[in-house]
Image (spheres, rainbow, N blue to C red):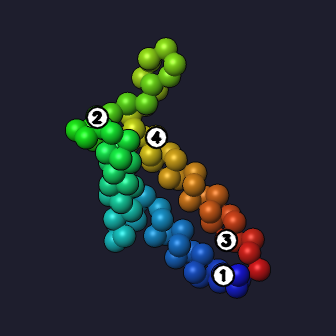
Amino acid sequence: MAKISKKTMENLEDILNRGCDYAATQEVVTEIANEALKESGCELCQCDDASVCDWDGDEVCTVEDFANIFWDKAVEKILNVLATEE
């Protein structure tokens, strides 16, 4: 794989940030979470009204919150891998 320029890395980081309005990244993350719920068999669920629960049935967070945290961490790890490619 060819080395990725610093400018390209900065652009990727900007576009993948959930705060990027022009790429509508937050909307994309929400859409992906809703699609994942639907594919998991939750036809009527939306990520902002579905919950992640622990083994005791206690709510941990909404699926939307989980998806946002997961996205941020996944993007960070992917960008770290790309930054080390030569």
Asked whether the beta carbons under mark 3 and mark 2 sit within 8 Å of each other, the answer is no
Residue at the spot of label 2: 49
Q: How much space separates mark 2 and mark 1, taking CA atoms?
A: 39 Å
Residue at the spot of label 3: 82
Up/down of 9 relative to 24, above or below: below
Task: Classify residue 31 as left or right of residue 66.
Answer: left
Q: Which amino acid does label 2 sit on?
A: Asp
- Around disc 4, counting alpha carbons within 10 Å, would you say few (fewer than 14), some (14 to 19), or many (20 or more)? some
Asked whether the beta carbons under mark 1 and mark 3 sit within 8 Å of each other, the answer is yes
Q: Can residue 48 be seen in this view?
A: no
Q: How much space separates mark 4 and mark 3, taking CA atoms?
A: 24 Å
Q: What residue type is labelled 3?
A: Leu
Q: Where is residue 49 in the image (x, y as percent from the top left)?
A: 28, 34
Instruction: Tell me, for residue 66, which label it has, or none.
Output: 4
Task: Point out the residue furthest to the top here.
Answer: 56
Q: How much space separates mark 3 and mark 2, taking CA atoms?
A: 34 Å
Q: Which of marks 1 and 4 is nearer the N terminus?
A: 1
**Label 2 residue SS:** loop
Corner quadrant of residue 21: bottom left
Q: What residue type is labelled 1?
A: Ile
Q: How much space separates mark 1 and mark 4, taking CA atoms?
A: 30 Å
**Label 3 residue SS:** helix
- Around disc 1, counting alpha carbons within 10 Å, would you say few (fewer than 14), some (14 to 19), or many (20 or more)? few
Residue at the spot of label 1: 4
| Image point (65%, 83%), residue name | 5
Q: How much space separates mark 1 and mark 3, taking CA atoms?
A: 7 Å
**Label 4 residue SS:** helix
